[in-house]
Image (cartoon, rainbow, N blue to C red):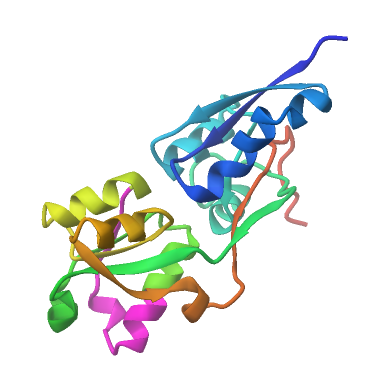
Amino acid sequence: MSSIPIRIGVLRLIDCSPPIVAREYGFFADAGLEADIAVEPSWANIADKLAYGILDAAVILGPLAIAMGLGLRGRRTALALVAMLSREGNAVVLRHGAERWLEEARFAAVHAYSNHDLLLRRYLAEAGIDLARTKIGGRPPAEMVASLAAGEIDGFCAGAPWGALAVRTGFGTVVADSATLAPGHPETYGPPRLQVVFSMN
């Protein structure tokens, strides 16, 4: 019996390790699947490749999957979220001294449709920052620390290991984490793409 090929998209995040581990330990092969893991640079790439059938499955953010299903982000694509892969695990990181000028600071989250964006907004609101005057841009998780080091942003919210790397390299400090801001929140899921569109009836 031949294996069914399946292409799975992941990012360079600890959240994305389950499919890699499953492939290495033969769990996909045991299920009759030949898994090809595609490391993508951003959540936007994951979303686009799922929408156009280049990926069969991916680790994805819950809010992004919902936005795709509703057609709020690119091509409307129905996704079945088959497994929650992680909870919490995000960090809000500020460049040293940025807490003194939060009103003027530049921030980034990993995607507009992400828990990271929501957590960053909660942190800023609790710090008394007017969110209507705050700009939060989007950047791939793997670019956050370099952007902080280059002074392109003053703070970000991303999943592991990027907060820890900012601290270890001395470019930033963790000022809040998702366990504190939203205890127990779901983070990433593993959805296969479906060839159907949500019915909004």
Q: Residue furthest top?
A: 1
Q: Residue 101 at x, y = what percent?
A: 13, 80
Residue at 70% from the left image edge and 37% from the top image edge: 192
In this rendering, is residue 146 above or below 5? Answer: below
Q: Which residues are magenta?
A: 121-139
In this rendering, is residue 161 above or below 8? Answer: below
Q: Is residue 44 left or right of residue 51?
A: left
Q: Is residue 65 at all visible to an observer of this figure?
A: yes
Q: Residue 87 at x, y = what percent?
A: 60, 63
Residue at 52% from the left image edge and 52% from the top image edge: 72
Q: Quadrant of residue 79?
A: top right
Depth check: give the residue in front, 49 or 167. Answer: 167
Q: Is residue 181 left or right of residue 143?
A: right
Image quadrant where one finds the C terminus: bottom right
Depth check: give the residue in front, 51 or 197. Answer: 51
Q: Residue 94 at x, y = what percent?
A: 24, 69
Q: Quadrant of residue 76?
A: top right
Residue at 16% from the left image edge and 74% from the top image edge: 98
* Residue 129 among those drawn in magenta: yes
In this rendering, is residue 164 above or below 22? Answer: below
Q: Quadrant of residue 197?
A: top right
Depth check: give the residue in front, 149 or 119. Answer: 149
Depth check: give the residue in front, 142 or 115. Answer: 142
Image quadrant where one finds the N terminus: top right
